Amino acid sequence: MGWEYVTEDDLSGSVRDLRIVIVGCGGGGCNSVHRLNSMGLDETVDTIAINTDRPHLSHIKAHKRLLIGQGITNGTGSGGNPDIGKACGINAEPEIAKVLQGADLTFITVGLGGGTGTGLAPIVAEVARRLGSVVIVIATTPFEVELGRPKVALRGLRELRSVSDTILLLDNNRLLDMVSNLPVQQAFMVMDQLISEMVKGIIEVISKPSLINLDFADLKTILGHGGISTVLYAENSDPEALVRDALNNPLLEIDIAGATGALVHITGGDNLTLKRVNKIMERINSYMDDSARVIFGAKVDPEFEGNIRMLAVVTGIAELAEDCDRLDIVEDIGEVVNKYST
């Protein structure tokens, strides 16, 4: 008949909460997880740090820490060799599968260009997907002065493409333009703050009820529209300025023209009108491909009185897709990463 009668008891029954995990791979990825924990995350999110370096891992704050490859590295790290990082990951697949069991959504943070993270992250992504999880990789690319590491990063990027649902790339070189005079720890916290806002925003969008609701299925639908994505995030009281700020974030600067999918969530106070929501969506839609799939949600929150927040996951970005298709013949990631850093 196309419909089903649902009782009040059915509606009030419990639904299994999504299991969301954030996995840090290697030194850079574990550092991000450590700082994310220090900034505070939703208590329902599990953080996992995986490394081959025992001393480094011992100082990382995470819900679970997994030292891998002891028989290969003796706990001293991979020495910048991704082959060693990959071998350690393969040997530890049963342990990795155990900590990822039951995950619905897996975020993987990794600093590409090193040994453990570059070799390990594709293994973790592959295991997570095999277990049925949606996999979002948030990867940072090396500084230009780190000679040799860009080619290693390119290798890791190639492998991650085939085993993740989407990749969000962040270019460390942009920190030099923005916060070059800050102490190193504070400078990297700027990047991790952005990662934190991305992760927390996506989790909030799919897990908390809204006036116009978005759910995990919506996220999966949009991620199915393209393997290369970006996240737009901004707060402003003016709809036009809100979209402009999101598109001009110096750490996320990218041309989204021709994108094929977007999941957009808008939060505002009691004064959030339908006209304002429509204006924001019209601005976003003006950049999208004519056949794009766009899903949006809206929420009223008294804490945002007089202000509007927008978070959008945009996929199938034409500019990035063109570069992604060229990765197999590009020898130097430097020319790609300037455009490819989202």
Image: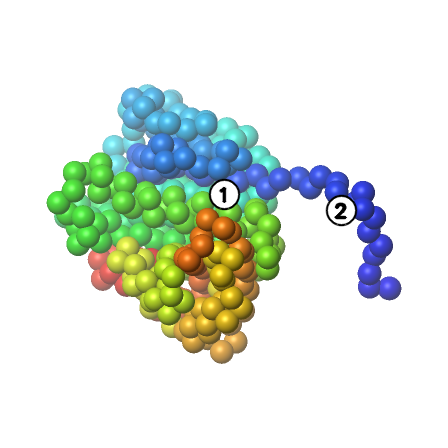
- Residue 261 in the image: above or below residue 182: below
Residue 15 placed where, x, y %? 69, 41
The answer to which of 21 and 298 lies nearer the viewer is 298
For marks 1 and 2, the one nearer the N-term is 2
Disc 1, SS: strand
Kindly identify which numbered label has been placed on residue 247.
none
Q: Quadrant of the N terminus?
A: bottom right
Instruction: Give me the residue at 57% from left, 35% from top.
Output: 101
- Residue 335 in the image: above or below residue 287: above
| Label 2 Cα crowd, 10 Å radius (few <14 / some 14-19 / many 20+) | few
The answer to which of 279 and 206 lies nearer the viewer is 279
Task: Mark 1 and mark 2 in contact? Answer it, CB < 8 Å.
Answer: no
Residue type highlighted by circle 2: Leu
Residue 42 visible in the snapshot: yes
Kindly identify which numbered label has been placed on residue 11.
2
Instruction: Give me the residue at 41% from left, 49% from top.
Output: 198
Instruction: Give me the residue at 49% from left, 50% from top.
Output: 302
Kindly identify which numbered label has been placed on residue 106.
1
